[in-house]
Image (cartoon, rainbow, N blue to C red):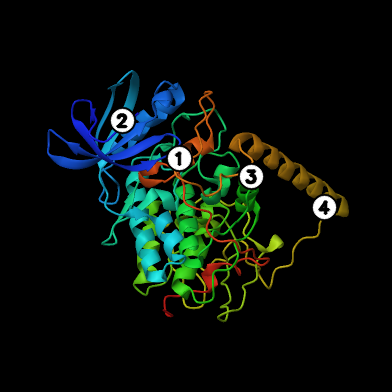
Amino acid sequence: MLSSGQLIAERYRLTSQIAVGGMGEVWEASDTRLDRTVAVKILKAELSGNAEFLHRFRAEAKTTASLNHQNIAAVHDYGETEAGESAIAFLVMELVEGEPLAGILQREGRIAADRTLDILEQAASALQAAHERGLVHRDVKPGNIMVTPAGGVKLTDFGIAKAADSAPVTRNGMVMGTAHYIAPEQALGQDAAPGSDVYSLAVCGYECLAGRRPFLSENAVTVAMMHIRDVPPPLPQDVPPYARAVIEATLVKDPRQRYASGGEFAAAIAAVRSGHALPVPSGMTGYAAGGATQHTTTAVPPGQAATVGPGSHPSMQPVSPVSAQQPGVMTGGGATSHGMTPPGMTNPGAHPRQRPAGMWILLTLAAVVVVAAVAVLLIVLLGRDSEPPPSRVGDQPPSTNGNWSQADYDNGDNRYGYGHGDKHGHEEHAEGMTGTPWTKWDGTEQ
């Protein structure tokens, strides 16, 4: 049992508790050697003996310590020691004065567009520091984005981050991340990539602008399936076009059509904040280079939906190999500098090839089988029927049977990576985002 005044590792004197969660506690403490105030994240004693949790905790320390960026909470020390009769593991971090974005959303509901984009740009810059080192965060959400009183942003909780090309820390195929912010490819059990972090950050941006998450359900599997197959409801009408465009550009299902890294996303945000055209994601150049039909898109009047492909939403469709070309820029008429049609947009002059009726039946049956298989996969991998409802900090005990539980990792106040924010908003919408953003923002309308 930790208490104020307790000395950890003969160096860190605990002063006040900051947060409690299913995995442990975060304390404000005094570093008696260097005479500075720090945050000490302490893994629960019963979990310190769990090889999987301890491995993840050590990995978080090493991962975060390897990153040196103004928008990432710095790691000062890590250790494993005795506290009374128990062994504990602890992580000493920079003390961030501020609150999680989740707390701001809970208090304010919605956040103005300019402030939202400022938060997103800083968080994306932090992600780029990780992406440059080949690391993927895998759990970007409002609870892991700390905002200081001066408006600075600190990205926290690299506890489930991993190298993009490394072996997984957990069981093969396990879905890591929080369902409300998970990228479609992660929900499908595929490896997370930098673009997965970008998608999750865009979901955070959507929540800031709309005052609600794009997909709402008490069932985590249902939410994950929505990220795979559904189009988010349109953002409120009062969201400025430049902010709307950058979010819609990023909430696409196919990761090859998104901004490929935190740095590319940050650059896109900076462009629209400066009144410039929305840059084309670098992966989009592959469609033109790979032999896609060359023609321009038609400008769409404000408020009118663009024409989209089958299902009326972006899909994870095959694409041509990505070209080495630099990304293009959206032009005033909605065309890119490469003159291509973004995937999902219809070409008025093209006539689809007719397929025999038997082929459509086979395709339909195959689609049903795939959807059913994905549903079963998610039920098995997510391991829970629903995300825990908003609750008092630390009121749900962790699992100690050796099996990882999302509740163990996400329960409670999420400062410094423990817990989750509340379920934000309850509105449901039948219609989705109108078309693609490529025909809607050319940098001229603020």
Category of crowding for the residue at label 1, using alpha-carbon neighbours closer than 10 angstroms: few (below 14), some (14–19), many (at least 20) = many
Give me the C-alpha separation between circle 3 and circle 4.
28 Å
Label 1 vs label 4, nearer the camera: 1
**Which numbered tag is attached to residue 221?**
3
Which SS class for mark 4? helix
* Marks 3 and 1, the one that precedes in the sequence: 3
Which is nearer the eye, 291 or 104?
A: 104
User: Which residue, given by chain and number where applicable, does mark 4 sit on?
Assistant: 360
Circles 3 and 1 in contact, beta carbons < 8 Å: no
Give me the C-alpha separation between circle 1 and circle 4.
52 Å
Which SS class for mark 1? loop
User: Which residue, given by chain and number where applicable, does mark 2 sit on?
Assistant: 90
Is 91 positioned to the left or the right of 245 in the image?
Answer: left
**Which numbered tag is attached to residue 394?**
1
Q: Is residue 385 above or below residue 428?
A: above
Label 3 vs label 1, nearer the camera: 1
x and y percentages locating residue 321 in the rendered image: 53, 49
- Residue 201 in view, yes or no: yes
Label 1 vs label 2, nearer the camera: 1
Give me the C-alpha separation between circle 2 and circle 3.
33 Å
Which is nearer the eye, 133 or 425?
A: 425
Circles 2 and 3 in contact, beta carbons < 8 Å: no
Label 2 vs label 3, nearer the camera: 2
* Marks 1 and 2, the one that precedes in the sequence: 2
* Marks 4 and 2, the one that precedes in the sequence: 2
